[in-house]
Amino acid sequence: MSRLLAAALTVALAAALAVGAALGVVALLEATPDQPNTPLITYEQAGQGS
């Protein structure tokens, strides 16, 4: 019975740790500022003539 209890506690602890890590990652991703969407290369627009 004690092995079953130890296994259940281990599973519960692992699940709590996984949820905590996931919440931490989400908090870190939301804390970083959005980067501007500027292109690295720009091309000049050519005229429409042939």
Image (cartoon, rainbow, N blue to C red):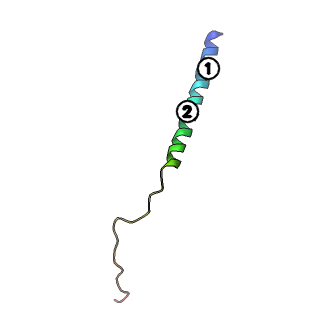
Find residue 10 and report its horizontal and vertical position in percent. Answer: 58, 21
| Image quadrant in which you'd find residue 42 | bottom left
The extreme top residue here reads: 1
Residue identified by numbered label 2? 18
Mark sitting on residue 21: none
Whether residues under marks 2 and 1 lie with C-beta atoms below 8 angstroms apart, the answer is no
| Image quadrant in which you'd find residue 37 | bottom left
Residue at image point 54% right, 43% down:
27
Of labels 2 and 1, earlier in sequence is: 1
Is 44 situated left or right of 15 in this image? Answer: left
Is 45 situated left or right of 34 in this image? Answer: left
Residue identified by numbered label 1? 9
The extreme bottom residue here reads: 49
Residue type marked 1: Leu
Q: How busy is the neighbourhood of tag 2: few (under 14 within 10 Å), some, or many (20 plus)?
A: few
Number of numbered discs visible in the structure rendering: 2
Residue 40 sits above or below residue 15 on the image = below
Find residue 23 and report its horizontal and vertical position in percent. Answer: 56, 39
Is 44 situated left or right of 5 in this image? Answer: left
The extreme right residue here reads: 1
Q: CA distance from mark 2 to mark 1?
A: 14 Å
Q: How busy is the neighbourhood of tag 1: few (under 14 within 10 Å), some, or many (20 plus)?
A: few
Residue at image point 51% right, 48% down:
31
Q: Secondary structure at mark 1?
A: helix
Residue type marked 2: Ala
| Image quadrant in which you'd find residue 6 | top right
Residue 13 sits above or below residue 35 on the image = above
Residue at image point 38% right, 87% down:
48
Depth check, front residue: 1 or 22: 22
Find residue 17 and report its horizontal and vertical position in percent. Answer: 56, 30
Residue 46 sits above or below residue 16 on the image = below
